[in-house]
Image (cartoon, rainbow, N blue to C red):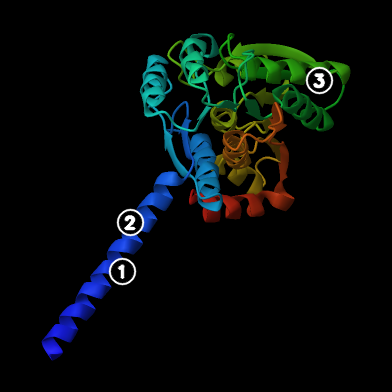
Amino acid sequence: MKKKWMGSLICMILLVAFISFIARFFKEDDRPKVVVVLKTLDKEYWRIFKAGTEKAFHDFDIDGKVIAPDSAYPITKQLNMLKAVVKENPDALIVTPSNPSLTIPVLEEFKQKNIPVLLADTDFKWTDKTAYIGTDNLELGKKAGALLGSMLQPGDQVALIGGNSDDPVFNDRIKGAKQTLEDAGIEIAAEQSGYDDTGHVKSVMENILQTYPDIKGVIAVNDLIALDALKIIEKQGTKIPVIGADGITEMVKYIEKGILDATVAQNPYDMGYLSVKQALKAIKGEAVEKRIDSGIDLITQDNAKDKLDFLANAVNLR
């Protein structure tokens, strides 16, 4: 009798466990499915972005995943990933396109399947996008120019280090910086690209310093280029302000140590989080704003430690 009772109890426990498993399985299966396709994950900026999306997946109970090629070049890597994702039929796609013009035909396939497509970080003219979530890059350039201008005098010479000529993000930043600097009477002595043809950072600061020894400041379109310029400037035994754009760990550490006074920074973590939040609204059929600004921060010695602590705690990058 006792053995029979124990057997019944074991069967009951197993049945409850099985039912619980099935319920959990179907619950997970019913969760919204969101795929995020980034340009790459080999840079800290994109790992910060990924951390923001994963926090949103958790907060909103989303079956989400983040994928990216091991390098942003060649761009066919990202295109092939997008073609594979179409076949998965996610409920929404978030993409940071490496090459907008070549990406549109693939994104049209998502549209034909009524899958919302949200652009993040890099915007471009495509009427069928659900939304753009990211930085107002013209405004970032203006703020970078205003920050550098506040450290200089009218008539001082500066250098602008941009990106590839066909990149709308970098072009807007340079345009905004030029407007503000010229309005402040600052002379733009040099303007060069900080990337080679394969998409890798190329060092141009040494040549700029040799050609324009009176340079009093630098604006770079991202922190990787800014850091390269800083290292050349340090090597030359010179100290001039360099303004970046991303707020990555190494750049913020220069400010915390007092080597730099300040820089401007995007918010890739917020960008990722907001992208997922808006994707969920689109899946539910709710109204989604066409353009969402993820904001720009001013990083100084006063808040550099807070920024580093945030990266350490939320992104584990310190």
Q: Residues within 10 Å of mark 1 (few under 14, many from 20)?
A: few
**250, 24: nearer the viewer:** 24
Label 2, label 1: how far apart the Cα atoms are: 10 Å
Residue 142 place in picture, x, y as percent: 78, 24
| Nearer-the-camera pick, 142 or 136 | 136
Query: Of the residues tagged 3 and 2, which is closer to the observer?
Result: 2
Q: Which residue is mark 3?
A: 181
Residue 206, x across and y down, in percent:
56, 19
Give the CA separation, mark 3 to mark 1: 69 Å
Q: Residue at x 64, y 54 (%)?
A: 305
Q: Position of residue 200 (x, y in %)?
A: 45, 20
Q: Which of label 3 and label 1 is nearer to you? A: 1
Q: Separation of disc 3 and disc 2 at Cα?
A: 63 Å
Which residue is at 53% across, 42% downward? 53
- Of 264 and 315, nearer the camera is 315
Mark sitting earlier along the chain (3/1): 1
Q: Residue at x 71, y 36 (%)?
A: 295
Q: Residue furthest bottom?
A: 2
The residue at the point 43 percent across, 39 percent down is: 65
Identify the amino acid type marked 3: Leu
Label 1 secondary element: helix
Residue labelled with disc 2: 22
Element marked by disc 2: helix
- The reply to whether residue 113 is visible in this rendering is yes
Q: Are marks 3 and 2 in contact (CB under 8 Å)?
A: no
Q: Which mark is residue 16?
A: 1
- Quadrant hosting residue 151: top right
